[in-house]
Amino acid sequence: MAIKEFRQPKNNGSVGLSRLCLREASHLSLVRHPNVVALLGVWPAKNSLLLELVEGQTLAERLKRGPVEPNETLGVSKCVSLALNYLHNLSPEAVIHLDIKSANVLLPSKSAATAKLCDFGSARLLPKHACGEFLLGGVSGTPAWMAPEVVEQRPVGRPADVYSLGVVFWEMITARRDTNLTQSYSQ
Ligand SMILES: Nc1ncnc2c1ncn2[C@@H]1O[C@H](COP(=O)(O)OP(=O)(O)OP(=O)(O)O)[C@@H](O)[C@H]1O
Ligand SMILES: [Mg+2]
């Protein structure tokens, strides 16, 4: 089992840790898919989530060794696409992840063909009445992977995740990224 503990960021004043923990838990509790890390429980006293342990490495760690082979690039992209297709079609509310990036894709060493999406800390539910888009009320995610509508604080929806998946695909082919733009933001 993996434990994700929420801690006070060093330079970010005081944030409601229990609120962040419970919000991520509530989003993950709606989800059950082979390409998404499973929530096993919540440990409220420790502001922690109990998660399925994925032994292996993140795609970001893998990319430090250089570009990914075309077959593996297609395999990982397929896994993340299946996860997004599932999340985006959940009923009655779709889940928009809003922080798709290589550090949030886990590659299990035992079954490299089953990449798993993690980190629902930026995720939002798409309200039924929102016609596919809603206002975030700020910036959420990680700039190097953010869709233009997120950066410009325009209404966002499913395409924001698809844009970020495109950036991950480009990372896998080139093993490049803008390292100045990798600090994450959450609303
Ligand atoms: N279920 C899991 N199994 C194994 N490793 C995990 C799991 N969930 C997360 N991790 C590892 O922990 C890292 C951080 O987790 P996560 O992305 O959920 O949190 P975060 O809010 O981005 O934290 P940070 O800002 O410290 O990266 C991941 O990039 C991955 O390396
Ligand atoms: Mg993360």
Image: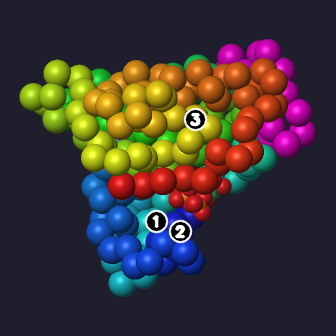
4 vs 31, left or right, is: right
Q: Earlier in the sequence, mark 2 or mark 3?
A: 2
From the image, tell me which residue sits under label 3.
145
Circle 3 crowding by C-alpha within 10 Å: few under 14, some 14–19, many from 20: many
Quarter of the picture containing the N terminus is bottom right
Instruction: Find the magenta span and give its range.
Output: 62-75
Q: Which is more foreground, mark 3 or mark 1?
A: 3
Secondary structure found at label 2: strand
Q: Are marks 3 and 1 in contact (CB under 8 Å)?
A: no
Residue at the limit of the structure toward the front, as seen here: 152
Q: Position of residue 143 (x, y in %)?
A: 56, 41
Front-most of residues 156 and 119: 156
Residue 50: give its label.
1
69 vs 98, left or right, is: right
Above or below: residue 67 compared with residue 38: above
Q: Residue at x 71, y 47 (%)?
A: 180
Q: Within the image, what quadrant is residue 32 found in? A: top left
Q: Residue at x 37, y 66 (%)?
A: 21
Q: Which is more foreground, mark 2 or mark 3?
A: 3
Above or below: residue 26 compared with residue 88: below
162 vs 125, left or right, is: right
Q: Amino acid at mark 2?
A: Ile
Q: Amino acid at mark 1?
A: Leu
Q: Position of residue 22 (x, y in %)?
A: 30, 65
How far is mark 3 from mark 1, CA to CA? 27 Å
Disc 1 within 8 angstroms of ligand 1 (CB): no
From the image, tell me which residue sits under label 2.
3
Q: Position of residue 16 (x, y in %)?
A: 33, 74
